[in-house]
Image (spheres, grey):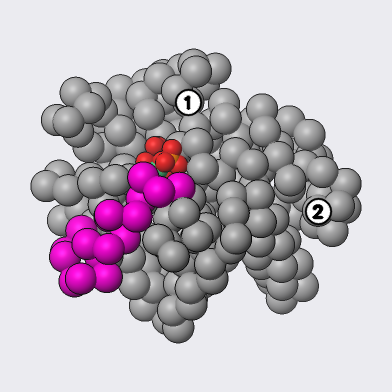
């Protein structure tokens, strides 16, 4: 099922996303005694993560039963300004009681190939055979990328490996990313999209242009688009 919710502005979007996260966590823990989630990188989710560390939301999640992964990572050390891990650590992970062994970062200090292999092993050990994420949060780049599935890259074509190392020409940088088979196996995939800078990309997607983000179609799970009016263009 695909749902779209448009929020008046970015703060309301962040609150809506935090509510979705908490409800997914409560449901997964009630049904399976744990919640396995992959966070998005970039800047959009920061306000959602900050809300998750606030008493209003943090008090509702049994954090010791949460496993944190990432949808992708830049190949930089964990405390580098560009690290998706660092952004999540600062905005909420350092403020909630998730055991360190349950924070499964992509090791950006390694080579992309080594980091991808280590992350795939960690993912497999945690999810088990046939396992899948309860929730994956994704952003949208203006070129239609999501996670680090950039247009024209080999990672978008990957249909078997759960994780890929990918060189992004446009950025002249390596990335590690979850692949489409992993993302599309997820119980609930949620896009967080804010700002007028994403309006044109969303319009291209609605017009049927085949971009990496349009390939996100959960096999049996839910796809939720959370946008603000700025991004939606109304
Ligand atoms: C990353 C993200 C990437 C991001 C989009 C949107 O590592 O940059 O995973 O996919 O979600 O580029 O980024 P903003 O939220 O900063 O617009």
Residue 46 in view here: yes
Residue 69 % position (x, y): 53, 45
Residue drawn 19% across the image and 23% down it = 172
Q: Is residue 148 above or below residue 134?
A: above
Residue 103 sits inside the magenta stretch: no
- Please tell me which residue lies in front, 200 or 52: 200
User: Which quadrant, please, contains the N terminus?
Assistant: bottom left
Q: Is residue 203 inside the magenta stretch? A: yes
Q: Position of residue 233 (x, y in %)?
A: 40, 61
The range drawn in magenta is 195-211
- Tell me if residue 139 can be seen: no
Q: Earlier in the sequence, mark 1 or mark 2?
A: 2
What whole-number distance in Å separates the C-alpha atoms at marks 1 and 2?
25 Å
Could you tell whether 131 is left or right of 13 in the image?
Answer: left
Whether tag 1 and tag 2 are in contact, CB under 8 A, the answer is no
In this rendering, the answer to whether 3 lies above or below 64 is: below
Q: How far across and down, in percent of the image, does residue 148 sit?
A: 31, 43
Q: Residue at x 88, y 46 (%)?
A: 55
Q: Residue furthest left?
A: 152
Ligand 1 - quadrant of the structure image = top left
The answer to whether the beta carbon of the residue marked 2 is less than 8 Å from any atom of ligand 1 is: no
Q: Which residue is mark 1?
A: 83
Q: Residue at x 49, y 16 (%)?
A: 80
Per the image, the residue denoted by label 2 is 57
């Amino acid at each position: 099922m695909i749902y779209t919710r448009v929020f008046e502005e970015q703060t309301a979007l962040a609150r809506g996303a935090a509510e979705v996260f908490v409800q997914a966590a409560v449901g997964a823990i009630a049904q399976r005694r744990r919640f396995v989630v992959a966070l998005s990188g970039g800047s959009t989710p920061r306000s959602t993560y900050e809300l998750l560390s606030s008493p209003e939301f943090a008090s509702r999640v049994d954090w010791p039963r949460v496993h944190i992964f990432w949808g992708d990572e830049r190949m930089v050390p964990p405390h580098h300004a560009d690290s998706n891990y660092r952004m999540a650590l600062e905005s909420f992970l350092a403020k909630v009681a998730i055991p360190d062994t349950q924070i499964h970062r992509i090791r950006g200090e390694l080579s992309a190939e080594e980091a991808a292999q280590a992350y795939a092993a960690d993912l497999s050990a945690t999810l088990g055979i046939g396992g899948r994420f309860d929730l994956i949060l994704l952003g949208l780049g203006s070129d239609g990328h999501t996670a680090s599935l950039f247009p024209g890259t080999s990672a978008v074509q990957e249909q078997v490996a759960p994780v890929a190392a990918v060189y992004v020409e446009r950025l002249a940088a390596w990335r590690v990313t979850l692949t489409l088979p992993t993302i599309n196996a997820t119980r609930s995939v949620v896009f967080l999209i804010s700002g007028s800078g994403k309006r044109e990309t969303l319009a291209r997607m609605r017009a049927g242009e085949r971009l990496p983000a349009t390939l996100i179609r959960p096999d049996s799970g839910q796809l939720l688009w959370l946008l603000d009016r700025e991004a939606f263009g109304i």
